Amino acid sequence: MSELRYPDAVVHFGVFFQGVNHGTIWSDPRSGSQLHHSTFTQLIRTAERGLFDAFFLGEGLRLREQHGRIHDLDIVGRPDALTELATLAGLTDRIGLVATQNTTYNDPADLARRLASLDVLSGGRAAWNVVTTDNAWTGANFRRGGYLDHADRYERAERFVTLARRIWDSWDGERFTPVTSDDRFFDVEISPTVPRSPQGHPVVFQAGDSPAGRDFAARSADVVFSRHGTDHAAALEFADDIRRRVVAAGRPEDDVLTFPGTQIVVADTEAEVEEKARWVLEQQVTPATALSLVGQVWGEDLSGYDPDGPLPAHDPAIAVVDGTRGAARQGHDPRSIAQQWRAIAEEHKYSLRELVLHNSSERGFAGTASQLADELTHWVRTGASSGFNISPYLVPSGLDDIVDQLVPALQDRGAYPAEYVGTTLREHLGLRAPLTHR
């Protein structure tokens, strides 16, 4: 059992309305449209009823495609995050509103103004999930192609965030000072049009697991997302590394919160937990999805294969997978992946789909409300995370069990707030003043 470093810490929850995934069960009759306003409204109202800190919207600047057609195993259509959050701001009172926005295909003056507008109109509840993109298939929508070298994306992002903060600070309520910049990324002179909100600046979130991404988060972010949402040891190692980098950047150790992304399955008994978790997994990894995911590694269309049969007997072609399909093998040798998968399939006598189910089984937490409350409290009080960014397996009803069962169990342990502590997102998260206000 890990040491309790923060014995009085409470669990924070955010909900992630994803932009790209196969984790949402689209085939279920309870699944709502990704374009219908009622889907967003129901989900965010449930989250606010459960005292969630924030509602996150993923971003997609280009739809997933396959052989020139819309990839029908993924989301078909996504509204602009800031537009959607602006409408939700008027329907909610406390929950934070987090827009995933790209620093590669936006410009500082425009994006800073739109984020500040959401922050002011919502009474200080806005946040910016800073993401970077350097791929050509997204850039084609902007007639830029892959104009930005991979190594430059975090440097541009950091300059972008710095400029945005200067813009947010340039109007103090009585007068403003134009913001100028002349470097290889931005040559601008900007006059602000929006004053500061009650929280000073929108909260800055960042997700990136590379050394460069972690350093960027340590210098610039308030909260960092991570993919370590199942393994406590890996999550603790990540959080400790972020804390070390934060101190090296001249900030207090606890200045950056960590929110692993995860899935939570709740049921009344252990037998029901096992049954429900299996149902969720099998609905997420349909036969067609299994063929698609294996096809990304093999670099070819495997839709003619039998998902209940073996993996392809031939080795994957060493070729670049169409980037619009995703990044299932990003940075990895496909033949090496195939070799590993074949070894697992042979050992366990798995079919193609069973192999994908095996590889997808570690998605998050499953248990009774009491078991989950103990486990999540342990994560937060040992320093493995500050909270969790939950991806519901059903939208918009996927938070109901969490809010109705898990949240009360956490509250009974003194590990979850009984009410919102303030009116701004910065207050909900217990964050200090913006970096430029200290």
Image (spheres, rainbow, N blue to C red):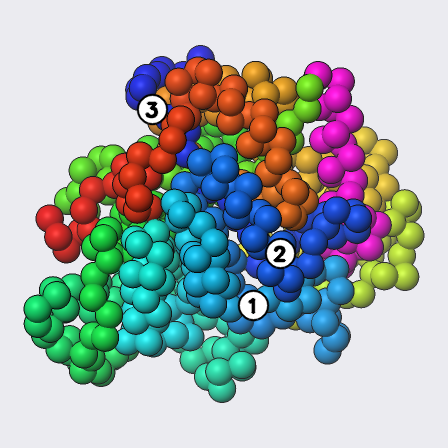
SS for tag 1? loop
Q: Is residue 264 above or below residue 22?
A: above
Q: Position of residue 201 (x, y in %)?
A: 24, 56
Magenta region, residue range: 269-296
Tell me the residue at 64%/64% (across/down).
35
Q: Nearer the viewer, residue 123 or 361?
A: 123
Q: Nearer the viewer, residue 242 or 122?
A: 122
Spatial CA span between label 3 and label 1: 36 Å
SS for tag 2? helix
Q: Position of residue 323 (x, y in %)?
A: 61, 68
Does residue 335 show up?
no
Q: How packed is label 3: few (under 14 Cα within 10 Å), some, or many (20 or more)?
A: many
**Can you identify the residue that label 1 sits on?**
79
Cβ atoms under marks 2 and 3 closer than 8 Å: no
Q: Which secondary structure dominates the residues rendered in magenta?
A: helix
Tell me the residue at 45%/21% (across/down).
411
Does residue 433 show up?
yes
Seen as rendered, the residue at the extreme bottom is: 143
Tell me the residue at 51%/68% (across/down).
80
**Can you identify the residue that label 3 sits on?**
9
Q: Residue 378 appears in which quarter of the rendering?
A: top left
In the figure, is residue 414 to the left or right of 165? right
Q: Nearer the viewer, residue 174 or 9?
A: 174
Identified by mark 2, the residue type is Ser
In the figure, is residue 436 to the left or right of 297? left
Identified by mark 1, the residue type is Pro
**Can you identify the residue that label 2 sits on?**
38
Q: Residue 94 appears in which quarter of the rendering?
A: top left
Tell me the residue at 62%/31% (across/down).
401
Quarter of the image with the N terminus in it: top left
Seen as rendered, the residue at the extreme top is: 1
Q: Is residue 341 above or below residue 180?
A: above
